[in-house]
Amino acid sequence: MSLDREHLEYPMRRYGMDHDRYQWSMLSERPPIRWPDGKPLALWVNVCLQFFPLNQQGKPFPVPGGMTMPYPDLRHFTLRDYGNRVGIYRILRALDQYGVRASFAVNSALAERAPQLLRTLAARGDEFVAHGVHMDALHYGGQAEAEERELVARCLDTLRKASGQAVTGWLSPARNESERTPELLREHGIEYFCDWVNDDMPYPFHTAGGDLWAMPLSTELEDRFVLMNNLHSEQSWLEQVSDACDFLLQEAQDSGSGRILALNIHPWLLGQPHRIGKLEQALQRITGKAGVWSAPPGEILAAFSAQQA
């Protein structure tokens, strides 16, 4: 039995995208981008500073990287806490050693629980990205609009007060969204978000309240994805990052247009004593190349958007 014809008809179907969130565009056909000083590759390192509740509810799904054992899962809870107490300071030293200007995606619950860490980052002048309330406070389809709006407002109010910054970037916990998340972000003063990874470069993302910028933050090179999901070694992560850097540099030079190497990392993973050396090697290799410009996402986006017609 065949489907009724109405199941095959979709009023938004057309060449390119079948929605109005962003326009169809081939990367190879876009106007060339030039980074400051003519550098072909922008390096964006984002450090996730997260709080995983011990009594997570897992609604609507258990968050990746969260508790996995019956309550109280102290083994995993304290490992995540290690990143915010110890691992982050190793990462800060590595960033400083190689002159890397990172962004820090922070859960607002952590800002309340570790105010000294927030003051340290703010005093350094590092860019903050809002990362939701905590890692068990997900945004998802079917969630009540009032509940999601309150989560966005609470996160941003807390981080803006704690950091003294405008905080105009957003990374959803688990990168999960509802159908209305972009509208709520725009409503609360967010200018760019990092949940969508379907491009190598920023692009305008339409909402009912005006455009956001989508800033693609690679999942494929994320430490948690490579080490925990793919079960690859730390050496393999280093090789993948190095290969991506070499390829993007060459692609930028061949195309005459800049590219972005985006690395998303977690202190509870790469801040471990047996892993921090691989991060240091990665940063040494990348920053040792003449064509690399290191900057936080706000500056990368400002340089990019200034060149858009």
Image (cartoon, helix red, strand yellow):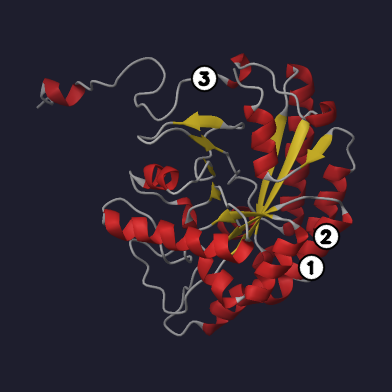
Q: In the picture, which quadrant includes the C terminus?
A: top right
Between 296 and 61, the residue placed more toward the observer is: 296
Q: Residues within 10 Å of mark 1 (few under 14, many from 20)?
A: some
Between 103 and 77, the residue placed more toward the observer is: 103
Left or right of 269 in this view: 113: left
Quarter of the image for residue 91 reads bottom right
Q: Amino acid at mark 2?
A: Ala
Residue tagged 3? 25
Q: Amino acid at mark 1?
A: Arg
Between 92 and 276, the residue placed more toward the observer is: 92
Residue tagged 2? 94
Left or right of 39 in this view: 81: left
Location of residue 153 in the rendering, given as x and y in whole percent from the top left corner: 42, 58
Location of residue 120 in the rendering, given as x and y in whole percent from the top left corner: 73, 68
Q: Earlier in the sequence, mark 1 or mark 3?
A: 3
Is residue 132 in sight in this rendering? Answer: no
Q: CA distance from mark 1 to mark 2?
A: 6 Å
Q: Is residue 123 above or below residue 27?
A: below
Is residue 214 in sight in this rendering? Answer: yes
Q: Is residue 302 above or below residue 96?
A: above
Does the residue at mark 1 contact the one at mark 2 (Cβ under 8 Å)?
Answer: yes
- Helix, strand or loop under label 1: helix
Q: Is residue 9 above or below residue 209?
A: above
- Helix, strand or loop under label 3: loop
Q: Residue at x 70, y 30 (%)?
A: 259
Q: Residue at x 77, y 47 (%)?
A: 239
Q: Residue at x 34, y 45 (%)?
A: 180
Q: CA distance from mark 3 to mark 2?
A: 37 Å
Left or right of 66 in this view: 302: right
Residue tagged 1? 90
Location of residue 54 in the rendering, given as x and y in whole percent from the top left corner: 47, 79
Q: Residue at x 73, y 75 (%)?
A: 86
